[in-house]
Image (cartoon, rainbow, N blue to C red):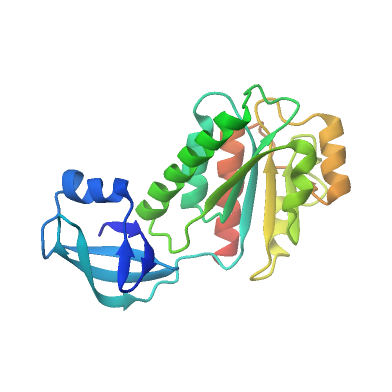
């Protein structure tokens, strides 16, 4: 069933213009059709009373427990091309709470302040669509694009940096993730193409990010982010 994140309150439900267009023109819903809405992290089954102007009636609240119990923040160094779009989409599907873009020494993409605002708006649109498709209850957020030196602003209880130079024989990623308890927050830092410089790894370690290996193979930037989140989601869902 189609799901939409809405704002307002029970007596005044507000859909975005994009959602209204989707309901009226794309899905071509009619009066009497059922849709799900998420309002203030609560899911409701609703019936469309009128399509234009759009009005829905709440039938019942639905009990759902899909969300992970840990808050996950992905700090992802901006890659080339449209790889970031893919990572944002998959990170949302895999349960992140927040995404932060990071400009590292090996980031090629250049973003000015005006362009940054526009991009963040587009990234949050990708998140909303992915969250609706994957039946999320909480809507993640792409918070900001920051310089590497500012990663300290997004420290959690557990902090990891994916570093290909980390020795495999100093324990495994699974050992580290097994130590995480329910409701403890987690931040993971993943590099762009070319990974991190030694000075960046040193700074991250000093701040509190533990270096972890993602295995013997060298992964592409977007693969590393998705793999790390996949493993984390699996471990936290057990």
The image shows residue 112, relative to residue 127, as above or below, that is above
Left/right of residue 24 with respect to residue 84 in the rendered view: left
Q: How many marks?
A: 0
Q: Could you tell me which residue is drawn at 48 percent across and 41 percent down?
A: 121
**Corner quadrant of residue 2:** bottom left
Q: Nearer the viewer, residue 45 or 182?
A: 45
Question: From where the camera sits, is residue 133 visible?
Answer: yes
Residue 154: percent from left, percent from top: 72, 52
Residue 212 showing in the rendered view: no
Q: Residue at x 37, y 76 (%)?
A: 63
Locate residue 228 relative to residue 207 in the image: left or right.
left
Q: Quadrant of residue 9?
A: bottom left
Of residues 140 and 220, the one drawn nearer to the viewer in this rendering: 140
Residue depicted at x 46% and y 47%: 127
Quadrant containing the N terminus in the rendered view: bottom left
* The residue positioned farthest toward the left in the image shown: 31
Q: In this rendering, is residue 123 above or below 208?
A: above
Residue 21 in percent (x, y) is at 23, 46
Answer with left or right where residue 20 lies relative to residue 106.
left
**Residue 64 position by quadrant:** bottom left
Choose between 165 and 159: the one closer to the eye.
159
62 sits to left or right of 122: left
x and y, in percent, of residue 120 in the image: 53, 39
Measured as percent of width and height from the top left, residue 206 is found at: 89, 46
Note whether 80 is above or below 65 in the view shown. above
Q: Residue at x 44, y 68 (%)?
A: 40
The C terminus is located in which quarter? bottom right
């Amino acid at each position: 069933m189609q799901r939409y994140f809405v704002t307002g309150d029970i007596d005044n439900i507000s859909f975005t213009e994009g959602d209204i267009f989707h309901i009226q023109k794309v899905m071509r819903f009619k009066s009497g059709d059922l849709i799900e809405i998420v309002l203030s992290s609560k899911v409701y089954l609703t019936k469309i009373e009128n399509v234009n102007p759009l009005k829905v009636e709440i039938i019942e609240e639905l009990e759902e427990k899909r969300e992970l119990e840990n808050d996950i923040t992905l700090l992802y160094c901006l890659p080339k091309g449209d790889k970031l779009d893919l990572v944002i989409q998959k990170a949302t599907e895999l349960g992140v709470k927040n995404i932060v873009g990071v400009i590292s020494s090996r980031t090629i993409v250049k973003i000015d302040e005006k362009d940054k605002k526009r991009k963040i708006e587009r990234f949050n649109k990708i998140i909303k669509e992915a969250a609706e498709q994957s039946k999320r209850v909480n809507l993640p957020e792409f918070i900001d694009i920051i310089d590497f030196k500012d990663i300290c602003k997004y420290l959690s209880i557990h902090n990891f940096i994916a570093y290909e130079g980390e020795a495999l024989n100093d324990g495994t990623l699974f050992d580290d993730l097994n130590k995480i308890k329910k409701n403890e927050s987690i931040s993971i830092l993943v590099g762009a193409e070319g990974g991190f410089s030694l000075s960046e790894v040193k700074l991250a370690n000093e701040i509190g990010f533990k270096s972890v290996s993602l295995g013997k193979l060298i992964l592409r930037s977007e693969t590393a982010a998705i793999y790390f989140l996949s493993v984390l989601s699996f471990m936290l869902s057990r």
